[in-house]
Image (tube, helix red, strand yellow):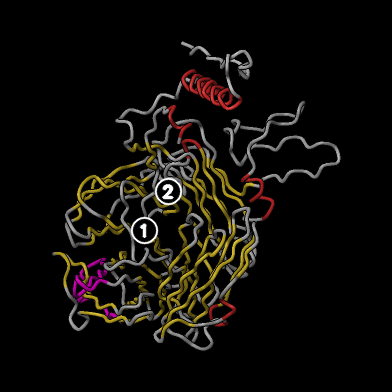
Amino acid sequence: MKKPTLKAPKLKAPDLSAVAGGSRTGQSLLAGVAVLGLVFGIAELRAPVSPAAGATGKRTSAQVERTALVCPPPMQGAVGSTTLTLFSPEGGTGSTGTGLLADATRDNVLAAQAPAQPAASGSPAPSGSPAPSGSPAAPPAAQPSGAPAAPVLDARLTLAKPGVPAAGPAANNDTAPGTFALATGNLAPGFTANQTTSSEQGGSALSGARCAASGTSFWFSGASTGPNRVDYVTLVNADTVPAVVDLRMYGDKGLIENELAAGIAVAPGTFKTLLLSGLTKGQVNDLAVHVVARSGRVGAGLHALENGKGADWLEPSADPAPAVTVPGIPADVTTAHLVVATDSEDDADLKVQLSGKNGWFTPAGKESIHVKAGMTAALDFQFSPETREGASAIRLTPTDPKHATPVVAGLRVDRENKGKTEAAWLAAGSPVGTRASVADNRGGQTALILTAVDTDAKVKVTSSAGTNGGTPATKDVAVPAGTTVTVDGIDPAGLNGPYALTVQTVSGGPVLATRQLTIPAKDVPAFTTQQLRDDHATVEVPQVAADPGVVLK
């Protein structure tokens, strides 16, 4: 039934000239009262939107309607290749949405932020289903004669529907730009994007990155400007406003001062790559880098390459916290190098534990690590077939709970085969929460590693169809407290093309999840790991109620 439309009465200033004995002040006061009466009348005539179920003043959950992510420039060299993959899990409601990925150029960024416009009169409608209002993929309106044409978004990749990923290549040159991905409507909740690069630069290596939202603060622990290391920080501005960024670098002697690392301007629709060795004034083996945007927002990444020994993107660390856990240590790791940092004015004394078959345990000779205020500290681990207990995780907790200093942590892990090695960089993680997904998984080459930090947990793992076919599958997995479980048999039946993994917490927890992708090349165990982090598919919104008294506040 169509709701009746309530029309507000036309306002007319009241005529008070006939009020007997009314002074000018009295007439003004009466006029004010009359106008207030009309205002309150209009407030009562405007029927409020019906609030969602629940008590007024309480918060309720609402589905996100737009998700925006940024991917770093591929750093693929002259002979590398990069695959970009988009995915949105099923379950999103609302209008049919749009999902796409485009190069982070000025025109694309401007077109993505522009509201949708109707097609020019007499012009044919765009192919496929029309995009929803506000979609970045909608065609621009016709421009007046002589006016500059509005920028048109040139999408490199589009996502057709939830539950089935889409994959495509990045630009095929060694200066390929960063990219950004957008999803609206029913594609926005849980939308994720991944970037995977195969490269021969410095030896066969696999570099993977989980595309993330633009932000103002990113921590990377485990960078280096030591011998044979080539580490770059990448900054991508996928917004329409300029960004100014500072790089705060911490080594084993404290904060490294360098004017070149401050006030870095990144224009809208551009990216910058900064070689760390040009900013540290000498070799520093164990670095923590804090990327801080003093204005605007950026997508930030840090790529590491050690000639002949591996390359990958450093996983961004979770925000500084007194207790952190680094998940995703492969079952066949040979060595690991832990770098812990704090920008606090207090030292940090931390207990070191590894997850094992029966829960957390303290490794012999590696019981603790001391981190001086504003500095980094490192710890090395050696693993052998006799001592390994399968995939693992490292937990750092204050030795004295009354003296808890926030820290960040990163872990380099090395795998070896026939004398050839490949490296990946892990980081302090955050739980999968209600749900998390990762795209670009390959049949027979993917391992899912789960760690329950405090209590027993149960999760549901869903494998999507492939980009070109396959039957989705689900699996319930129990993870005892303090243990790390590698999930087997997760490839969907009839798989054709890359697929996506979704992890949902059923009970207990928190649970940390890491995807390991292995694509051997010339005896090199080339691999990369990415964490699955809460997709924040819903947001909390406050309940509101009609309050005519707001005009008096």
Within 10 angstroms of label 2, few (less than 14), some, or many (20 or more) residues?
A: many
Determine contact: label 2, label 1, CB under 8 Å.
Answer: no
- The residue positioned 55% from the left and 23% from the top of the image is 35
Name the outermost residue toward the front.
21
- The residue positioned 41% from the left and 42% from the top of the image is 89
Main secondary structure found in the magenta portion: loop
Q: Is residue 354 above or below residue 89?
A: below
Q: Relative to the observer, which residue lies in front, 393 or 219?
A: 219
Q: Could you tell me residue 405's position as x and y percent? A: 29, 72
SS at mark 1 in the image: strand
Name the outermost residue toward the left.
358
Amino acid at circle 2 = Tyr
Residue 499 — which label?
2
Q: Which residues are magenta?
A: 380-404
Q: Could you tell me residue 392's position as x and y percent? A: 25, 67
Q: Is residue 263 left or right of residue 343?
A: right
Q: Relative to the observer, which residue lies in front, 51 or 551?
A: 551
Find disc 1 in the rendering and name its residue. Answer: 515
Q: Is residue 508 left or right of residue 140?
A: left
